[in-house]
Amino acid sequence: MIYELDPVEAIAVAAMGEPGHRQFFLMASGQGRTLTLSCEKAQIQALIVRLHQMLDAQGIDVEGQAASARRLQPGEPEWQVAEMGLGYHAERQMFVLVASEAAGTEQEPKTGDDAPSVRFWLSHRQVVDFSKQAEEVLSAGRPLCPRCGLPMDPAGHPCPVSNGARPIF
């Protein structure tokens, strides 16, 4: 099943919980519907990197534009995002973000055609605003150690540079 939000009216990322234990959500509204998907922080980070690469490839200036203030609140997630894809439709001059659930989960095995996915159609402006808003959400987590670059917990940080007791993987 494929859902289309064409065009998207608003799209945002939200994080809930304490830094280090946050849950991330991708939210969008359009065509009278608001959709909330659960996702991983690493997925959002990778999406931002790819968005910036695609904006550069299209010659769209990110720095000169200010983000809009519309915020969405997460609802109950429809599903956990397993895969994301990003493309650009040159004729429409729009980006398309595709988020899909895994083909099968432990609770409900699904065939490839039954795994839900959604296509978010975004204007250049929405992509710029979304990437800035998502970066703000990601940077609001745990501060990074200036010596080793790892996240610091409020309870303390065993910095490996200071010969801390952090396990090596």
Image: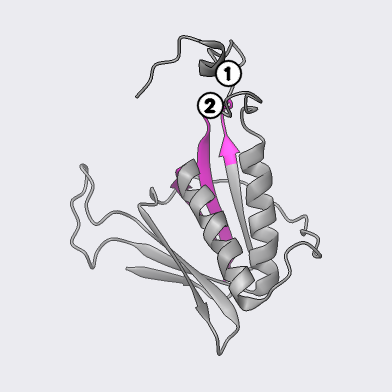
Q: Which mark is residue 46?
A: none
Q: Residue at x 60, y 83 (%)?
A: 93
Q: Residue at x 20, y 57 (%)?
A: 110
Using the image as rendered, state which of residue 72 and residue 148 is in the foreground. 148
Q: How many marks?
A: 2
Q: Residue at x 58, y 39 (%)?
A: 15
Main secondary structure type of the part rendered in magenta: strand
Amino acid carrying mark 2 in the image: Gly
Q: Circle 2 is placed at which residue position?
A: 20
Q: Position of residue 69 (x, y in %)?
A: 78, 55
Q: Quadrant of residue 94?
A: bottom right
Q: Residue at x 60, y 44 (%)?
A: 14
Q: Circle 1 is placed at which residue position?
A: 153
Please state the extent of the stretch shown in magenta in the rendering.
15-40
Using the image as rendered, state which of residue 133 and residue 56 is in the foreground. 56
| Quarter of the C terminus within the rendering | top left
Look at the image and say whether residue 26 sits in the magenta stretch: yes
Amino acid carrying mark 1 in the image: Asp
Category of crowding for the residue at label 2, using alpha-carbon neighbours closer than 10 angstroms: few (below 14), some (14–19), many (at least 20): few
Query: Can the viewer see residue 150 in this picture?
Result: yes
Q: Is residue 154 above or below residue 2?
A: above
Query: Can the viewer see residue 29 in this picture?
Result: no
Category of crowding for the residue at label 1, using alpha-carbon neighbours closer than 10 angstroms: few (below 14), some (14–19), many (at least 20): some
Look at the image and say whether residue 153 sits in the magenta stretch: no
Q: Is residue 167 above or below residue 73?
A: above
The numbered mark, 1 or 2, whose residue comes first in the sequence reads 2
Q: Quadrant of residue 33?
A: bottom right
**Callout 1 secondary element:** loop
Q: Position of residue 147 (x, y in %)?
A: 62, 23
Q: Position of residue 152 (x, y in %)?
A: 59, 21
Q: Do the residues bearing badges 1 and 2 touch, measured as CB atoms within 8 Å?
A: yes
Image-based side of 35 in relation to 99, left or right:
right
